Image (spheres, rainbow, N blue to C red):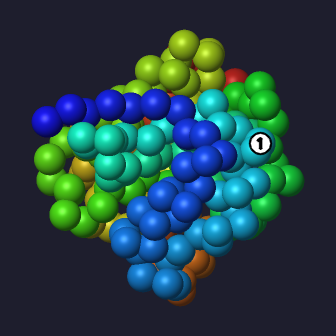
Amino acid sequence: MEVTIRTARFSDLEDIYSVETSCFPKQFQISYDYYKRALEVYPEHFFLLFVDHKLVGLINAMPTNKKDLSDSMLECMADYVKDGKFLMVIGLMVRPEFQHQGYAARLMKRLIRVARDEGRKSIVLTCRKELIDFYKSFGYTYQGISASVLGDEVWHQLRLDLDDDDDYQ
C-alpha cells in the first residue's frame, strides 16, 4: 500500500468535494465554491493524502491575522492574509472507510510542520466534543466553546501554540 501526501491542485477539486460530501452530513458541509476559491487563494496550505493513488483525506488551513476561527472564514476569503500569524483549520477529513488508520494524524503532522517552518504563531481549529482528545494528542489546548454555529452544532475551539511569544493573547 502506497501512502502519499501532496499539495492540492485545482484539478483535484471534484475529488476534494467528493471527500467533503462523504465525510459530513449536508448541514456541516462547506460549499463547493469555497473549495474552488481556496484552491485559487491558498493551495500551499491544502494537503491531500492518497492511498494507492486514491484521494482518501485532506486538511486545509487558511492563513490570517485573526486569532479565532469564525463561521465567515468557512464562507469567504475576507480574512485571508498570506503571511498571517495564524492558520485556521477549515477542514480535516478522511473518507469513512479509511478512518482510524492514522491518516488524519499524518495530515495534521504535515500541517504542523509546515506552520512551524513558516514561523506561524499558532494553529486554530474547531471540532465537535468527541474529537477534543484527538487534537489534544498533538499538543492543542482547549479554549472553550466556539462562536461557530455551523449546522446548529456546538463547536469547541482548540489552539496549538507554535512559539513562546504570547503577545497576541
Q: Is 156 located above or below residue 101 in the figure?
A: below
Instruction: Give residue 90's position: percent from left, percent from top.
Output: 57, 54
Would you name the residue on which mark 1 appears?
A: 41
Is residue 105 visible to us here? no
Instruction: Give residue 152's position: percent from left, percent from top.
Output: 53, 86
Residue 138 lies in quadrant: top left
Is residue 74 visible to us here? yes
Q: Residue at x 55, y 61 (%)?
A: 14
Q: Residue at x 65, y 37 (%)?
A: 43
Q: Is 70 located above or below residue 136 in the figure?
A: below
Instruction: Give residue 13's position: percent from left, percent from top.
Output: 59, 55
Using the image as rendered, state which of residue 155 and residue 97 is in the foreground.
97
Q: Is 14 located above or below residue 44 in the figure?
A: below
Residue 109 lies in quadrant: top left
Q: Is 142 located above or below residue 32 in the figure?
A: above
| Left-right relation of 94 to 83 | left
| Left-right relation of 83 to 96 | right
Q: Residue at x 77, y 42 (%)?
A: 41
Task: Tell me the quadrant of the picture where the N terminus can be found.
Answer: top left
Q: Residue at x 55, y 24 (%)?
A: 115
The amino acid marked with disc number 1 is Val
Bin the neighbour count of mark 1 within 10 Å (Cα to Cα): few under 14, some 14-19, many 20 and up. Answer: some
